Image (cartoon, helix red, strand yellow):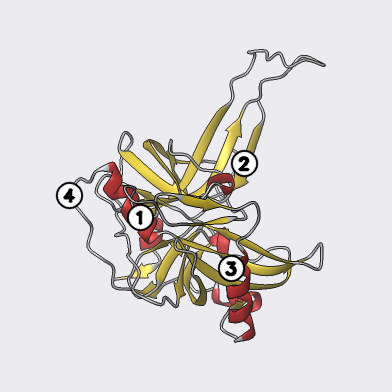
Amino acid sequence: MRTMAMALCGVLVCVAGCSPVGAPEGAIIREYHGTDPEWIEQAKKLKEAGRLLEMKEVKAQLRKSSCQLSLPLVRSRPLSGGELWSLARNAHVRVGYYFLCSKCSKWHFNVAGGYAITADGAVATCFHVVDPQNMKEGYLLAVTDAGDVLPVTEILAGSRFTDSCIVRIAPDKPLRPLPLSGRIAPGDDVWCYSDPANRPGFFSRGMVNRIYQHLHPASSKERYPVRINVSVEGAPGSSGAAVLDRFGNAVAHFSAVSVHGEKPRSAGTDQVHGSETVMVFHDTVRAADVLALIKP
């Protein structure tokens, strides 16, 4: 049995567009083969104005382990699928880098998921989304679902161990935050709005499969965080995207996907032998781990 795990960062290639009369606003997505040129222009202007957080400063600020925030109250009224879609979309904030990579002389855009947790600009995401890797030069930024590129002004707190991070952005108008809720159980219905595999604005429904903690049999010193497996869809590009409960609270965010097993094919043919079963597991970070970064 072969196991492969991969983090869910990815290059986002598109923005939400306008909908025709009769469809909900924002329901039709513009999908680009390549990064939206408007994003590049906005990022260049922010960089030239000195408004973007440089990757060396990001690394220094990632040492922060806690912050103080005033969070919205947890919701308790069950919502329809359309209401949950609207809440998730409005809270969705892509987080990532405008950067010069270490392999060529071109500037790139690489953003994954995040979600507003306060109206004044606090956004939760994965630690690995914010932690700069393989860049000659890089600048942290955010992109709203409407396509507005905004500067990240500060890292508020982060934990590499739990893969959780809170950043502050400079929004042009108040954000629409999601409450954080630690109440989650196997069998609960959940929803997610993210950009898996360069498919922007993909909304899916699933359930909580299990809550688990990996234990290392050979060493009592090895520590692993508690994770939640969910059956909503996710792929590279979904990292940091919020997982919502039926009330519209964020109960987790995407972190990684693990593929177990492989169906071998006969040499020179497309025939699949059923000797092994392929199964995909979606790992998410608990909202409780984000709440642990926030002082009462």
Give the answer, above or below, for where 261 lies relative to 254: above
Query: Mark 4 or 2, which is nearer the eye?
Result: 4
Please tell me which of labels 4 and 3 falls first in the chain: 3
Q: Judging from the image, what secondary structure is the residue with disc 2 in?
A: strand
Which numbered disc covers residue 5?
A: 2
Instruction: Report if residue 146 is visible in the image.
Output: yes
Toward the viewer: 120 or 19?
A: 19
Proximity of marks 1 and 2: CB atoms separated by less than 8 Å: no
Farthest residue in the bottom direction?
49
Query: Mark 4 or 3, which is nearer the eye?
Result: 3
Proximity of marks 1 and 4: CB atoms separated by less than 8 Å: no
> Which residue is at 18% across, 51% downward?
76
Which numbered disc covers residue 25?
A: 1
Please tell me which of labels 1 and 2 falls first in the chain: 2
What is the distance, in whole Å, between disc 4 and disc 3 at their CAs?
A: 38 Å
Proximity of marks 4 and 3: CB atoms separated by less than 8 Å: no
In the rendered image, residue 94, in percent from the top left (x then y), is placed at 50, 61
Three-letter amino acid code at the position of disc 4: Arg
Give the residue pinned by disc 4.
77
Give the answer, above or below, for where 165 lies relative to 169: above
What is the distance, in whole Å, between disc 4 and disc 2 at their CAs?
A: 36 Å
Query: Mark 3 or 2, which is nearer the eye?
Result: 3
Q: Residues within 10 Å of mark 2 (few under 14, many from 20)?
A: some
Q: State which quarter of the image contains the N terminus.
A: top right
Tell me if 52 is positioned left or right of 254 in this view.
right
